[in-house]
Image (tube, rainbow, N blue to C red):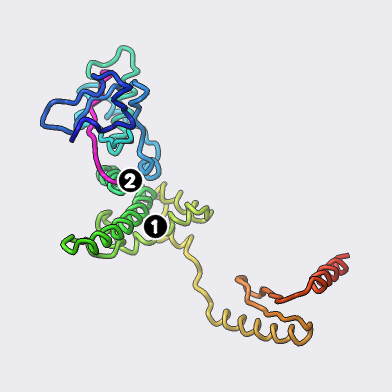
Amino acid sequence: MTNTCLTRSFPRDRLYKNARRKIQSAEADLYIIPIKHPMSTLRRHPLSVKLYGDSEPDQSLIDSIRSVGILNPIIVNEEGEIISGNRRYKAYMHLYDENPRPQHITRWLVVRLAVNEHLGYERMVIDSNVQRVKTKGQIAREAAALLRIEKEMAAEREKAGKRNRSVNLRKGRASKLVGEQLGISERTVEKAAEVVAAAESGDKEAVAALELLDKNEASFSAAFKKVEKAPKDEAAIAAQEADAEALSAWLKANSGFDCEVKRGKEAGTYHVILHRLTEVQVRSLVSEKIRKAA
């Protein structure tokens, strides 16, 4: 590890040299940063905000940090995003503004630098919250995020395996691997991910279902049923397609147009497609529509 890390969030040429003083110990990834310097402001990782919201530190955590300080360093990436320790950081900043300031709260904060790739940081965010007491909604969001991460990482591993056959690929269905990590079934992972995806797309039923999960007022299966699409009635679809063909033949015979009729998505509706119309024919159709409307 060199002393060139954190260069975006903490540019060496713009900070007082002691502000980037590396702790000389066996922990080579620990750094001291000035918490009130504008270039060293830490912020939450976007995935952490998405999964867990903006939770406040409880009083017991605040009291503990007031008494002994932060025992486990906050983990950050090179962008100054907090990977682990959001509540500890918020509690520390709360105590920093107290008057008088507690003995163990200083303007210098020890952080641990994590060096990883984008997907690796996202996994670390979730892994660092294993001990958190979570709502079903938070578990559902974790399932959706981990499913996406696992699939993207699997694609990267596959590429690596093709380039280097000695690479040990992690095998198994993504939903199964995620279920093992979260302690839920493979099918529950898939249901939870579908509810989250539907909610993020703006589906009102899914948004309401996810809110119930956030309150622990519904099961994953109950939430999924609210967004599950009804199975298609194949017989009804086949009958409507047959009607569309009959309507096409009737319309061609009685209108003189080169046309076809297609089944609409809604039952009992159809789309009429007219081919190779002249300008005069188009205008006559519009004129007829206007005449009837009048």
- Residue 138, compared with residue 4, is above or below; it is below
Q: Mark on residue 134?
A: 2
Q: Residue at x 88, y 68 (%)?
A: 291
Q: Is residue 108 magenta?
A: yes
Which class describes the residues within 10 Å of circle 1: few (<14), some (14-19), or many (20+)?
many
Q: Earlier in the sequence, mark 1 or mark 2?
A: 2
Q: Amino acid at mark 1?
A: Ala
Which portion, as a residue range, is magenta?
A: 105-118
Quarter of the image for residue 243 reads bottom right
- Does the segment drawn in magenta span residue 136? no
Number of the label disc, if any, that sits on residue 193:
1
- The residue drawn where x is 39% and y is 57% is 193
Residue plotted at (44% across, 56% down): 197
Q: Is residue 178 visible?
A: no
Place residue 7 in its image quadrant.
top left
Q: Position of residue 183 (x, y in %)?
A: 26, 56
Q: Amino acid at mark 2?
A: Lys
| Residue nearest the observer in this picture, 78 or 249 | 78
